[in-house]
Image (cartoon, rainbow, N blue to C red):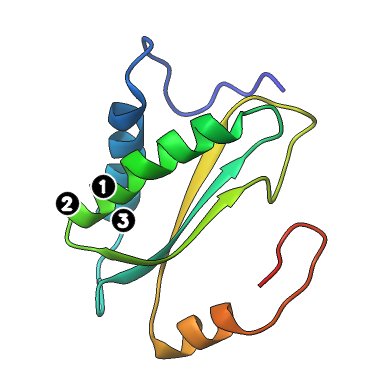
Amino acid sequence: HGEPGIQRGPLRPADDVARSLVDAIVGDIEDRGGGEVALLVNGLGATAYLDQYILYRGARRALEASGLRVVRSYVGEFITSLEMTGASVTVTLLDDELLALLDAPASTPRFKA
């Protein structure tokens, strides 16, 4: 929709982009707890699933390199923006309670558990 975003730059390999996104997220985490996370890659509407999974692969590698263990993964179109190209990466630190809630049965228009 024309938002400038927080950074513009030259075209880079997907793994480099994923690493930059994960580094920004991990940099904000003060207490890593047990080090277990859920990773969600959300396509914005016009991003091919192949591209979403390539971004996921890079994000997972970067998280694991930072010492975090991905125990739940989600890739798909959960929140779209009128066929906009792009993707978002969400990382959630998990404890036993959050993991149980995440695994609980759920049925929404875009997320099924």
Position in image of residue 13 (x %, y %): 32, 20
Q: Which residue is mark 2?
A: 65
Residue 2 in percent (x, y) is at 67, 18
Can you give x and y, in whole percent of width and height, for residue 67 in the image? 17, 61
Q: Secondary structure at mark 3?
A: loop
Report the front residue among 6 and 93.
Answer: 93
For the residues labelled 1 and 3, the Cα–Cα distance comes to: 18 Å
Residue, disc 3: 28
Task: Report, in whole angstroms, how far the alpha carbon at label 3 lies from the one at label 2.
Answer: 16 Å
Q: On the rendered image, what quadrant is the C terminus found in?
A: bottom right
* Above/below status of 63 relative to 38: above
Q: Earlier in the sequence, mark 1 or mark 3?
A: 3
Image height of 101 relative to 19, above or below = below
Q: Amino acid at mark 2?
A: Ala
| Residue 82: numbered disc | none
Q: Nearer the viewer, mark 3 or mark 2?
A: 2
Q: Residue at x 32, y 39 (%)?
A: 58
